[in-house]
Image (cartoon, rainbow, N blue to C red):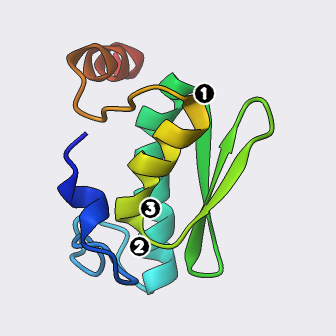
């Protein structure tokens, strides 16, 4: 994972409000759309992400949980919960995602 995603701090991620998800509408709809996209990757690590009250809740299959303030903090928290690297750009993860869409 690129360390810059979690390094900027703040209450928002660079992708917030860009309309990149195509969800349009409110900030809540945008956060939920980003969570849905992130879940496509996170499921390969046994994790799920939900948007709740302007924050994200990250959960493992074993019941571990972390509250995440902004989107950029998801990957470092995912690594803490799983105890292993979680790379959304891992070619194996991307291949699995593409295969699931076929």
Dot 3 or dot 1: first in sequence order is 3
Dots 3, 2 in contact, CB < 8 A: yes
Please tell me the numbered disc located at residue 33: 3
In this picture, residue 86 sits left or right of residue 3: right
Q: Quadrant of the C terminus?
A: top left
Question: Of callouts 1 and 2, which one flags the residue occurring earlier in the amino acid sequence?
Answer: 2
- Hey, which quadrant is residue 53 in on the image? bottom right
Q: Can the viewer see residue 86 in this picture?
A: yes
Q: Position of residue 33 (x, y in %)?
A: 44, 61
Secondary-structure class at tag 3 = helix
Task: Please give the name of the residue rendered at 54% of the width and 29% of the height, measured from the top-left corner.
Answer: 83
**Mark 1 and mark 2: span between their CA atoms?**
23 Å
SS for callout 2: helix
- The residue singled out by tag 2 in the image is 30
Secondary structure of residue under mark 1: loop
Which circle, 1 or 2, is nearer the viewer?
1
Of residues 34 and 72, the one nearer the viewer is: 72
- Give the left or right position of residue 4, taking residue 21 as reference: left
Q: Residue at x 48, y 75 (%)?
A: 29
Tell me if residue 9 comes above or below residue 3 in the rendering. Answer: below
Write down the residue under mark 1. Answer: 46
């Amino acid at each position: 994972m690129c360390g810059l995603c979690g390094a900027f701090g703040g209450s928002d991620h660079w992708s917030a409000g860009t309309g990149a998800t195509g969800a349009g509408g409110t900030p809540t709809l945008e956060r939920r759309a980003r969570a849905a996209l992130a879940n496509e990757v996170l499921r390969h690590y046994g994790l799920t992400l939900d948007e709740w009250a302007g924050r994200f809740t990250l959960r493992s299959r074993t019941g571990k949980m972390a509250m995440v303030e902004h989107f950029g903090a998801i990957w470092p928290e995912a690594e803490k919960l799983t105890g292993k690297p979680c790379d959304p750009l891992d070619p194996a993860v991307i291949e699995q995602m593409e295969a699931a869409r076929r």
